[in-house]
Amino acid sequence: MPSFVINEKCDGCKAQDRTACQYICPNDLMVLDKEKNKAYNRAVDMCWECYSCVKICPTQAIEVRGYADFMPLGGVVQPLRSTDSIMWAVKFRNKKVKRFKFPIRTTPEGTIVPDAGFETGSDDLKSPILRTEPDSL
Ligand code: SF4
Ligand code: SF4
């Protein structure tokens, strides 16, 4: 099931120009209703349930139904990020809650170097070699 926004929790990222969910969605699906100051998924059939918006939302306002391989039908899952870990809270139908905490790789926003620093690749689109080759080999 695609992502959906719980209106009561969404604060529109405090009216910033671009909300966190808009910034992160690889399919550019999340939009902000500026009148209501609430975000929504504008093309649910295009959502591949990647969880990126769920993980980045600062108010835990977005949900995606958990995959069947890690949670039972009818449950709810909500991830909560911190600087060095991510906690997945799974709430079962009988109200039982289980939490799983994992370390994360942290790469601060804006610090990734395009092409991993290799600048000598070919700009020829018909070339059979990759952009960073041969230096990256
Ligand atoms: S990231 Fe969360 S709080 Fe911000 S606009 Fe999207 S749903 Fe609302
Ligand atoms: S789950 Fe992924 S693809 Fe779907 S709206 Fe969120 S960020 Fe976009």
Image: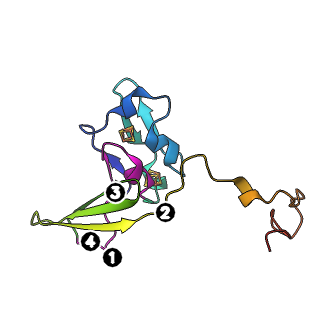
Tell me the residue that label 2 is attached to: 105
Marks 4 and 2, the one that precedes in the sequence: 4
Looking at this view, name the residue that lies furthest to the top.
35
Colour pattern of the rendering: rainbow
- Compute the Cα span from label 1 to label 3: 14 Å
Residue 21 falls in which quadrant of the image? top left
Q: Pick the residue in front: 115 or 128.
A: 115
**Of helix, strand and loop, which mostly describes the magenta segment?**
loop
Secondary structure of residue under mark 2: loop
Q: Residue at x 36, y 68 (%)?
A: 102
State yes or no: Cβ of the residue under disc 3 lies below 8 Å from any atom of ligand 2: yes
Tell me the residue that label 4 is attached to: 71
Crowd class of label 4 (few under 14; some 14 to 19; many from 20; radius 10 Å): some
Q: x, y (%) of residue 75?
A: 21, 64
Are the two marked residues, 4 and 3, in contact with CB atoms closer than 8 angstroms? no
- Compute the Cα span from label 1 to label 2: 23 Å
Amino acid found under the numbered disc labelled 3:
Val
Secondary structure of residue under mark 4: loop
Q: Which residues are magenta?
A: 51-72
- Vertically, is 27 above or below 121? above
